[in-house]
Amino acid sequence: MRRHRFGRIAALIAFAYLAAVAVLGAFALTTDRGDLLREVFQEPLADEQPLRRMGALLAGIDIRYPMPGSDHHPLAGTFAPDLTLHTDQGMTSVAELMRPARPILLDLADRPDLREVARDRRSRVEIRTAKTDQRPADALLIRPDAHIAWAATIDEPAGTASPALREALSGWFGN
C-alpha cells in the first residue's frame, strides 16, 4: 500500500512542477522574448526526431543512471524501451507490464537458464517471457521505475549471463 501511495505523491509533485513550468512558459511567450523563443524552437521542433528528443528531456526518460562495474550492456541504466510484446496471453507492451511497479525479468529469447537464476526471487521479481520484432537483448531486468538494471546481450552465453544476472538481482533486489 505504501508503494502505491508514494506513486501518487510522486505523480502529484511531477504534475505541480509541470503546471508551474507551463504557467511560466505561457508568461514568457506573451513577451517579445517569447516571439524570439518561438522563432528559435519552431523550426527544429517541426521534425519528429528533435521533437522526440525534447519530449524525452522534458519527461526525464533520457536519464542514464551510472551502473556499477565496467562490463554491462549499453541499455543498462537507461529507460526501458516500450517494446510491443507477444506473449501466450496475447499482445502487450513493456509499459503495460510495468503498471504494477514491480521489478521484472523480461526474457525475450526464451532463456530457461536466466529464468532459473531468477526463480528463487519470484516473490520480489516478476518473470515474464515474450517475443518482440526488434529484440534489443536476450533478457532485461527492469527496475520498478522502468530503468534497466541489467541486460543480456543477444546470444550471450549462459556462462557469463547467468552470473551477471545473479549479481544484478542480488545487488538491486537483495538475496
Image (cartoon, rainbow, N blue to C red):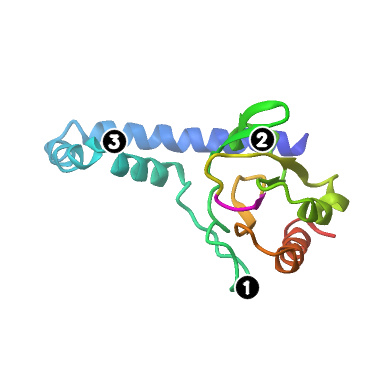
In the displayed structure, does residue 77 sit left or right of residue 34?
right
Residue at image location 41% in from the left, 32% down from the top: 19
> Residue 97, located in which quarter of the rendered image?
top right
108 within the magenta span:
no
Label 2 sits on a secondary structure element that is helix
The residue beneath circle 3 is 25
Q: Residues within 10 Å of mark 1 (few under 14, many from 20)?
A: few
Label 1 sits on a secondary structure element that is loop
In this view, the mark in front (2 or 3): 2
Count of all numbered marks drawn on residues in the image: 3
In the displayed structure, does residue 102 sit left or right of residue 10?
right
Q: CA distance from mark 2 to mark 1?
A: 28 Å
Which residue is more in the foreground, 169 or 137? 137
Residue 100 point in image, percent of width and height: 70, 34
In this view, the mark in front (3 or 1): 1
Q: CA distance from mark 3 to mark 1?
A: 41 Å
Do the numbered discs 2 and 3 sit on residues whose CB atoms are within 8 Å? no
Which residue is more in the foreground, 108 or 99? 108
Residue 120 point in image, percent of width and height: 88, 52
The residue beneath circle 1 is 69
Amino acid type at mark 1: Gly
Q: Which mark is residue 97?
A: 2
Mark 2 or mark 3, which has the lower sequence index? 3
Which residue is more in the foreground, 78 or 37? 78
| Magenta stretch in the rendered image | 136-142
Do the numbered discs 3 and 1 sit on residues whose CB atoms are within 8 Å? no
Q: Residue furthest bottom?
A: 70
Q: Please tell me whether residue 113 is drawn above or below residue 108 in the rendered image.
A: below
Amino acid type at mark 2: Leu
Mark 2 or mark 1, which has the lower sequence index? 1
Label 3 sits on a secondary structure element that is helix
